[in-house]
Image (cartoon, coloured by chain):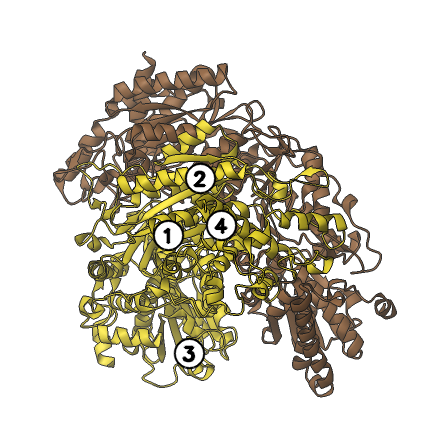
Chain colours: A yellow, B brown
């Protein structure tokens, strides 16, 4: 049997199954004449991209069989669901994962019926589809995912079909240059297949309509060696594709460090589908994007056209009488361990090994008395991350958009470099092909690479300026949705969490000002399902170490850690930090004056700058209003504020009320937008007593304390708040209130004159003697 | 005087002024030896990119002078503030806008002192900088802004310096292809200047380190004709730059439709700055990124180095004794009306003309009785937008990421086409070089183009799938921040609002499922300053028309309109719709049974699907619990829910309490996440009585009603809610509650069997007879 005959049969079978999924409720093998009631009443699905996806898959399977390649398949074009599902079924993987969808006629019926059907499966290459690590709903990330999957997988080939619609997106356009960050030998192969079917939803695509020569120049400019496969006549295109794939894989074997090859596949949109419908051309046009034939249940000629279309694949040759794939189709399927639909890399949890973590307590800063000395929390974390990188030389990567040094994590360069395969100069530092820190000025690439790396069973951390993490809001959304879905799929094994370290945060943009101030990513994160999201605001170095260790051990979450890079007060010794982080929030006894009694007021805080201002306010109150019983509560794990019904970390009302009181004013100094706290606590008994301070979009290039004052989270304002809110105090503390007003004016005037904060602010420490007296 | 001598003098002056801004508090002309106290205590600013920016500006000024070009200058690289401020001062514009910063020594002192200083100006090319439409804080959008500015400005040249760091971002990488959407003759010229200074913050850049030939191929592949200018020796680079600019502008004049030219400028980072500091190379390395010389106040040799650096520009030649620019510098400045720092296109409000709007009431659908018939709201809006396009053939554009037809706005193609300058095929539809609908599969480009278009004084609307607008969250953030700042700058004239039409929304992703379901953009928007954000959820076609008209007339806002494209019930005649939208929210009397009395329960709703379910629930209650007094409140303008202290549209407590009651249960059926409502109303008297239903991340590819049921916003669930929440009802309505449970189960079973909603759901209309009886 000619190999290409088998490839063609496989392709026809996949096309047949794809059409069947879009259209049929019953009569899957067309064993009887097609009737209206065999057809779904609502036709939901997309044909346009499918035959091209099926074509590539069929041909890659030949390469796998002949060369024993270890390969996964990433479907970039949107709406690739029918194709990916068809392959998983033809390869037997679908039945392995979903035993009720058998590889026979009843199974085929079930397969068809469930597609894009209520209670069934989605129309995209969703987590439900075996062999997938990429959904393709939101376009633009296929190639970044492919590179992420290939890093540190030297045996793996990641074939990545890129739609020409998707190719217009920014993230995809940036992803081509990822070849400068892939190191042959250490990393696997990424084989981009740019599929030019010419149209997106309703428009032609740019790359399909620029001159051939310009396209070639573009792809060569990206650093690839493009191979063109073009045509509409199946046999000719089969021959050309096979030839090109042989050339490509020969080159990869013979010259692995050469210019990376890629394929440009130019075939008609909706290839092999209806050529014309109602007198209008369909195949090869934008009309083939979705469902080329409609009104199939109501117009007999459409029904006949559908039957003719499906028969055009000659199903009798492709399936046995009982519905099993025929020998000619089965011959095109690789052996079990090499099937792309069953490749464990596409179910990364199967390959996941826990990180070898050093003991984070070894990196603790010593804290003899609270808030007396300062450290750079991320600077301290850098030492821990250095050793995480060192102990996990093939399974952990640190991503950053050119900000790793700025975020004070430079200790990592003591053990590894930044991955770099382009030219270097003598003045460069810390660049090497085998570097494990990935720095590129694209948050999209950092995120996409890390997602691909995690989904294939490895670990990592993405460090980013807080404001600019919004650039990947939508990528976060999609990854969170993937995790939400994957958790409900029994055969999907847990993967390592996606860890964000957000530094250079809103309160310390002295250099950069307003455009760099945005703590709103937390709100985007908190909109996703509670079971997959975690938010931590460790206030100092030791709590950051504890939180980081916890996050790196976790699975199937998105962990967001916000931490400062500037010098921050060391608040607690390591043991206390561990206990505090384990509780997620708690009283700082040394800063409180309630001595275990019911307090007069609660000062709550979350985030390093708000915590420092809260402590300074507590010190002022202790000094000036010594009889006031103040409780200082610090929140590290923001999700603790939710009720247990809304988050697994949620705190019961009784516990919440005990901590915050149900009847005392609570002045809450928050890192982010103040309403973000209200949305977490609106069901609590004492909610009306919460007065939340936070970022209110007031900012510019200024000093840290001026920034705090602009948004009313400064110590003086907090003291005024206490005076205004605690019943009865105002009467006796009018003088103090005026002093606070004056102190703010003085502090501001100082910044205007000297360009920096007054020394009593910038070198403030916790007044130790008072502290000792109280303890 | 040799022209290039003058250009060089201007360049040196700009460099001198840039260094002065970063470093000096006093002694701006170095008229006496530099002392430590002349230097700022905190050195905040960035030198690296500055000399290159100054170089380009100086040379473009020569072109402007010699050819009388109308040009604006976009500074892509981050931290370009010192450069842009220096030019505005040298051109006299700074003094025009800020009279206290005079063009003499005291003014220069003020100019230096204010930069990156508390109470001063930001370090980026912020709205405060005359001549800027692009801040450069968040990188990646310069070229998209440039194209947006050039559209429909045939006389304008937009020179756009692109940093090689910025060039790694996705949005920038996608922007190169914008040349396929620019039509010579109708649109102006975009001249990209890719500035390869080799480094971003701490790393080399990709484009600076790929082979020269690969870079050329890449830029040719993008469709440009690149011209290289490279070197470190100023005189040689001056000559080459002048020669290339002459070639480029000759070509633009002689062959305006030819391959668009661009410039690659390869000069050292921190050019002309300190060559070496502490024995380490600085000029031409990443060390020049920020402040090359530090510890200037404490180490005399550093102070001397700073003085030497500043003297190297020979300030005596550049400034008169009183600080005014010397003749040789002034000679390089274009005449008043051509100065880039004063170009009115960069203060677009100066050029803004109101749109010529047709009367939106002419497009109204007739509504004889409420919720009896259906229309596609966006389909109806399409007719209005068609005529907006027709009446404003040079000042309004419609942007969409390949979704304009999908969002049912196709009526616009009756009057215009989609802009397209690449090849076309006979089967293409509605493509033309003079099209005014901009479709590209990049939300980043749609947003960037529109921002550039608005900031230069024109109007537009961006239509997008709701879920994927998150792709531009961070661009929205930056534009909102620009507006927030610009409103406080007296000379910045108001510009047209940025209007989003979000359709294909969370509740109707029957095709696409989970990845296409995300209503969280509203939360991102509501985090920004109340004065610039507006959110509208018109429930039907007529309210959408009214809202759209309002948004297109508004200034300096970001308006977000969420509206369905699917058939939705027509709720109210046009006059009622206008009144309802003017109020922003209100009682639907025909759906209510409280007859003006205090109701037993309030059913509130916002968004088309939640409103339909609320109405259906009201109808069920009317039928089954006829004595219950139900008030139905619909919210169009979400910001009305806030208190007046938090938003200009905010509603006073008394009015709020009258409408929603302070003591009755309120079941609120919301389009977005339920906590988004709580964060708006947590201060209201009756807040504890609000029970908000909304999207809870439950979704898949399914029917509309199944989707509503999955998230508990369906009619049956609402009736159950009423039974559970209205005191005393539960006792008598146990039977009805069970019927509701059964109805949900039946509806779900129907979808599982037939793949579509039961007819009583899909063809539900408001029960007119009951309605009539009540009226």
Q: How many marks?
A: 4
In this rendering, which labeled residue sits more in front, label 1 or label 4?
A: 1
**Which SS class for mark 2?**
helix
Q: Are marks 3 and 2 in contact (CB under 8 Å)?
A: no
Disc 4 from disc 2: Cα separation: 35 Å
**Residue located beneath label 1 in the image:** A71
Residue A373 drawn above or below residue A627: above
Q: Are marks 3 and 2 on the same chain?
A: yes
Q: Earlier in the sequence, mark 3 or mark 2?
A: 2
**Chain of the residue where label 4 is placed in the rendered structure:** B
Residue A249 percent location from the top left of the image: 34, 42
- Residue situated in front as seen by the camera: B345 or A206: A206
Disc 3 from disc 2: Cα separation: 68 Å
- The structure residue drawn at horizontal position 66% and vertical position 31%, both measured from the top left corner, is B393
Q: Earlier in the sequence, mark 2 or mark 1?
A: 1
Q: Are marks 2 and 1 on the same chain?
A: yes
Q: Residue furthest front?
A: A1
**Residue located beneath label 4 in the image:** B471
In this rendering, which labeled residue sits more in front, label 3 or label 4?
A: 4
Numbered label attached to residue A241: 2
In this rendering, which labeled residue sits more in front, label 3 or label 1?
A: 1
**Chain of the residue where label 2 is placed in the rendered structure:** A
**Residue located beneath label 3 in the image:** A660
Numbered label attached to residue A747: none
Q: Earlier in the sequence, mark 3 or mark 1?
A: 1
**Chain of the residue where label 3 is placed in the rendered structure:** A
Disc 3 from disc 1: Cα separation: 55 Å
Residue A46 drawn above or below residue B421: below
Horizontal relation, residue B53 to residue A421: left or right: right
| Residue B606 visible, this angle | no
**Which SS class for mark 3?**
helix
């Amino acid at each position: 049997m000619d190999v290409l005959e088998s490839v063609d049969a496989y392709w026809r079978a996949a096309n047949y199954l794809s059409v069947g999924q879009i259209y049929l409720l019953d009569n899957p093998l067309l064993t009887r004449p097609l009737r209206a009631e065999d057809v779904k009443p609502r036709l939901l699905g997309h044909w346009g991209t499918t035959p091209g996806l099926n074509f590539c898959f069929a041909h890659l399977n030949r390469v796998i069989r002949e060369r024993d390649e270890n390969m996964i398949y990433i479907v970039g074009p949107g709406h690739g669901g029918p194709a990916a599902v068809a392959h998983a079924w033809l390869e037997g993987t679908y039945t392995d994962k979903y035993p009720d969808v058998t590889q026979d006629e009843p199974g085929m019926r079930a397969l068809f019926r469930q597609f894009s059907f209520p209670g069934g499966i989605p129309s995209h290459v969703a987590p439900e589809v075996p062999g997938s690590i990429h959904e393709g709903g939101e376009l633009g990330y296929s190639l970044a995912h492919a590179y992420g999957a290939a890093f540190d997988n030297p045996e793996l080939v990641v074939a990545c079909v890129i739609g020409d619609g998707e190719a217009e997106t920014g993230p995809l356009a940036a992803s081509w240059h990822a070849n400068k960050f892939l190191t042959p030998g250490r990393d696997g192969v990424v084989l981009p297949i740019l599929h030019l079917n010419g149209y997106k939803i309703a428009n032609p695509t740019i790359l399909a309509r620029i001159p051939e020569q310009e396209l070639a120049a573009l792809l060569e400019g990206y650093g690839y060696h493009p191979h063109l496969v073009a045509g509409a006549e199946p046999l000719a295109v089969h021959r050309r594709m096979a030839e090109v794939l042989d050339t490509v894989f020969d080159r990869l074997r013979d010259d692995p460090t050469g210019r990376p090859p890629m394929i440009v596949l130019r075939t008609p949109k909706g290839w092999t589908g209806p050529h014309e419908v109602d007198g209008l051309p369909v195949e090869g046009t934008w009309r083939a994007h979705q469902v080329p034939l409609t009104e199939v249940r109501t117009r007999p000629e459409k029904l006949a056209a559908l039957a003719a279309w499906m028969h055009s694949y000659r199903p009798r040759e492709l399936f046995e009488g009982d519905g099993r794939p025929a020998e000619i189709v089965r011959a095109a399927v690789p052996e079990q361990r090499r099937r792309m639909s069953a490749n464990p890399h596409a179910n990364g949890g199967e390959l996941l090994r826990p990180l070898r973590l050093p003991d984070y307590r070894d990196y603790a800063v010593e804290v003899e008395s609270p808030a007396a000395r300062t450290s750079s929390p991320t600077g301290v974390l850098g030492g821990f991350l250095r050793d995480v990188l060192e102990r996990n030389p093939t399974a952990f990567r640190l991503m950053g958009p050119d900000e790793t040094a700025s975020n004070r994590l430079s200790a990592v360069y003591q053990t590894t470099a930044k991955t770099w395969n382009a030219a270097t100069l003598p003045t460069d530092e810390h660049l090497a092909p085998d570097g494990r820190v990935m720095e590129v000025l694209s948050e999209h690439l950092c995120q996409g690479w890390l997602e691909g790396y995690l989904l294939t069973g490895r670990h990592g951390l993405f460090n980013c300026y807080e404001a600019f993490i919004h650039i990947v809001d939508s990528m976060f959304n999609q990854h969170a949705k993937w995790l939400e879905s994957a958790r409900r799929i029994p055969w999907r094994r847990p993967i390592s969490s996606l860890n964000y370290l957000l530094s250079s945060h809103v309160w310390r943009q002295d250099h950069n000002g307003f455009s760099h101030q945005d703590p709103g990513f937390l709100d985007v994160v908190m909109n996703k399902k509670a079971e997959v999201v975690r938010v931590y605001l460790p206030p100092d170095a030791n709590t950051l170490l504890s939180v980081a260790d916890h996050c790196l051990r976790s699975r199937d979450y998105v962990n967001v850690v916000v931490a400062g890079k500037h010098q921050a007060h060391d608040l607690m010794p390591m043991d206390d930090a561990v206990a505090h982080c384990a509780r997620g929030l708690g009283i700082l006894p040394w800063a409180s004056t309630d001595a275990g009694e019911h307090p007069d007021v609660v000062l709550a805080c979350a985030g390093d700058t708000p915590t420092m201002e809260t402590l300074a306010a507590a010190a002022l109150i202790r000094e000036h209003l010594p009889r006031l019983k103040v409780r200082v509560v610090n929140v590290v794990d923001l999700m603790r504020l939710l009720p247990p019904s809304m988050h697994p970390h949620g705190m019961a009302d009784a516990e919440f009320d005990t901590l915050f009181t149900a009847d005392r004013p609570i002045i809450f100094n928050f890192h982010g937008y103040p309403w973000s706290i209200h949305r977490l606590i609106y069901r609590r008994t004492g909610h009306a007593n919460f007065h939340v301070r936070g970022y209110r979009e007031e900012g510019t290039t200024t000093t840290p304390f001026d920034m705090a004052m602009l948004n009313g989270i400064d110590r003086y304002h907090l003291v005024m708040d206490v005076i205004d809110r605690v019943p009865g105090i105002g009467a006796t503390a009018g003088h103090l209130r005026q002093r606070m007003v004056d102190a703010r004016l003085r502090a501001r005037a100082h910044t205007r004159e000297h360009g920096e904060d007054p020394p009593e602010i910038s070198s403030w420490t916790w007044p130790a003697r008072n502290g000792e007296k109280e303890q």
